[in-house]
Image: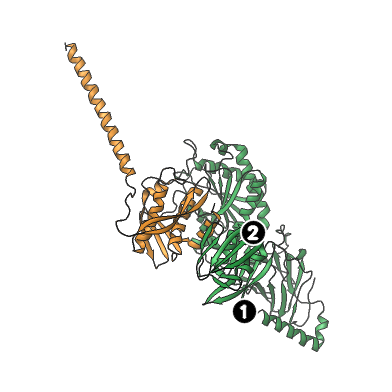
Amino acid sequence: MIPRHLLIALALLLAAVFGLGFYVLHLKSRAEESRAADSRPVAPPVSGNKAHVTLFLADDAAGVLRRRDAEVTLPTEPSLRARELLRALVAEYQQKNSAHPLPAGADVSDVYLVNGNLAVVDLNADFADRHRSGILVESLTVTSLVQTLAANLPAITQVKFLVDGKERATLAGHADLSSRYDVGAVRQLVTGLQP
Amino acid sequence: MRWNRNLAAWRSPLRRVGLLLAVLATVAGRGPAAEERHLHIFAANARYQVAITEREGKEYISLTDLLQPLGQFSGRVDGHKFKYRFRGVEGEVQDGKTQARAGKLKAELPAPAVLEGESALIPLAAAPSLLAHFLGTHVNYHPASRRLMVGVADVSFTAELRKGESPALVLSFSAPVNPTISTGAGALRMVFTREPVVSWAEKFNFNDRLIPSAVYSESAGAAVLTVHGTAPLLATFSNSGRTITIAAAPGAAPPTVAVAPTPVLPLEVPAPAPAPAPQPSLPVGGYRPRFLVVIDPSHGGLDRGASLSPQLAEKDVTLALGRRLRTELQNRGFNTVLLRDGDVTLSPEQRAEAANGVRAAVYISLHADVLGTGVRVYTCLLPPATSHPGAFLPWESAQAGYLGSSRTLANSILEEIAKKQISVAMQPAPVAPLNNIAAAAVAVEVAPARPDVNSLTQAAYQQAVVTAIASALAQARPQLEGAR
């Protein structure tokens, strides 16, 4: 016969083991969440000068693109400049209370300039995989990126999107990423999307 | 009405020489050198030309000349700036600068503006986007003929050869036309300067001994249709100017004269034509293309589309809408194909291949969303085709040649949905796979009737939307068939 005090001590020990186990699992999931949130770019480029740029920011509720002037630190190399410009735009969308929220972790991995007039924009997987689905929201994202590029780099006449370096049919089921975007056609659309 | 009914009059030699000179003068006057310097604008309430000038190798037009005929306009030079007010919206351009302002929009001109006298010159290439911004309507520019269509429907036509003992070519236009016609050895030439006539085909082959072919071209503000014949041809107008029948002239020597048909039609763009009466004839190629509507309920299978609520996926709403639309169209006598009638996964590419493979006349992609309320109608986001397509269409821009038809359909849907007291909007958008569809193509996105997602699944709301789409198709069908 096991003494009663030993049984009580054993039960308390088991309860402590289970409690600690749950607490460790909880800490692990919190650590994973914060890692995902921290994957967005938070630091400005290390070199470059402040430059005045024009951002075209989407507003879901109104279904419009709003033009906003901003100051961004930009490198001198054109493709890096284009990437940092788009990162500044994405960072605006990742602010609290953004009118067109993009998922945490969404980023522009690279921008390649081909023949001076074609910009190939490589988005990361989080950008597309976690983007909200719908014609309006996806169109606003794409046209906002294209028009911001075109407004600040006038030589660009076409824009092509990749996701993680690969071709992809759509952004989140609606916006076509298989074709190149004609800047002139987007500009006309944006004209109609002004508030 | 027959245009060579006074053939006896040509027998007077003096009159023939005089008229021949008149024709030559007319033809010379229409040569590229004389006409290339004007932009021809077709608007709903005005038809006018704007002179084109050249500065440092680039084409410019006067901002005042461009905007004044379209609404209240005033402008003044203020130092290096030209400040203007058009329809209550203020704007300005600066001498030697590419930045321009039109209301709240700051635009980048393709070349610097030039101040000249009391007006400003802007690059010709900036005119379409400027007008689209100010007027809030679609603007089509045809560079080959320097024609700018501002918020007006193109006038399209079909060409059908009526075989038989005396073959005749029947041209059916979507609106009344009033071309200048000249006949010469082996050809009858029609020049359309008053109506925005367009064609997506450059050459029509009829495999007929009398009328082997016709050629469409554009130049200097005009669309030109030249019908080749092995005998002298004459043109007859009917159906209030909507139909031109071309047949062999009855046993006369080929006349060489320019004639203007009567009655002279008003300059205003006519209302869309009703369905042309069935012709007891064979169309080009010997068969009448069927009018097939492809309904594409978007998403499906592994692709759920947008999550409209925790329980409701976009793919389920689009399928319900698709089935309702199929029934509604079939009740109206349309041939229809539903691209998916179950929960299957289809890529955008497969959808486009399927629609193009069955030679669809119309492609309607159905979507659902919880953002906003009402219905949104989208056409593709491609620049209009700058050249006529050949036998093969580029996959990435197959839709470019059908933009006119797609906009016609979208406008019709817009009108019919508005009649149901449902809020509706229309705009271009980069929706897959619209770019790849070789037919009139639109995407229709249905949002809740009010801020309550449950209304998306209500039968009455879904039925109201699909009934409006079906009515719109019935309304637009004659124009869409004409464009084909």
Three-letter code for the amino acid on which mark 1 is drawn: Pro
Picture layout, residue A13 above or below residue B141: above
Label 2 sits on a secondary structure element that is: loop
The answer to which of B266 and A59 lies nearer the viewer is A59
User: Is the C terminus of chain B in the top left, top right, bottom left or bottom right quadrant?
Assistant: bottom right
Residue B192 falls left or right of residue A5? right
| Chain drawn in green | B
Disc assigned to residue B383: none
User: Is the N terminus of chain B in the top left, top right, bottom left or bottom right quadrant?
Assistant: bottom right
Residue A149 falls left or right of residue B355? left
Label 1 neighbour load within 10 Å: few <14, some 14-19, many 20+: few
Residue under mark 2: which chain is it in? B
Task: Write the residue at 33% across / 53% down.
Answer: A44
| Chain drawn in orange | A
Disc assigned to residue B32: 1
Q: Position of residue A31 (x, y in %)?
A: 29, 38
- Residue B137 seen: no
Residue farthest to the front, as pictured = B79
Q: Position of residue B180 (x, y in %)?
A: 72, 74
Q: Label 2 belongs to which residue?
A: B87
Task: Write the residue at 23% across / 23% down.
Answer: A16
Residue under mark 1: which chain is it in? B
Q: Position of residue B272 (x, y in %)?
A: 70, 58
Residue B179 falls left or right of residue B456? right
Three-letter code for the amino acid on which mark 2 is drawn: Arg
For the residues labelled 2 and 1, say whether their Cβ atoms are less than 8 Å apart: no
The answer to which of A56 and A137 lies nearer the viewer is A56
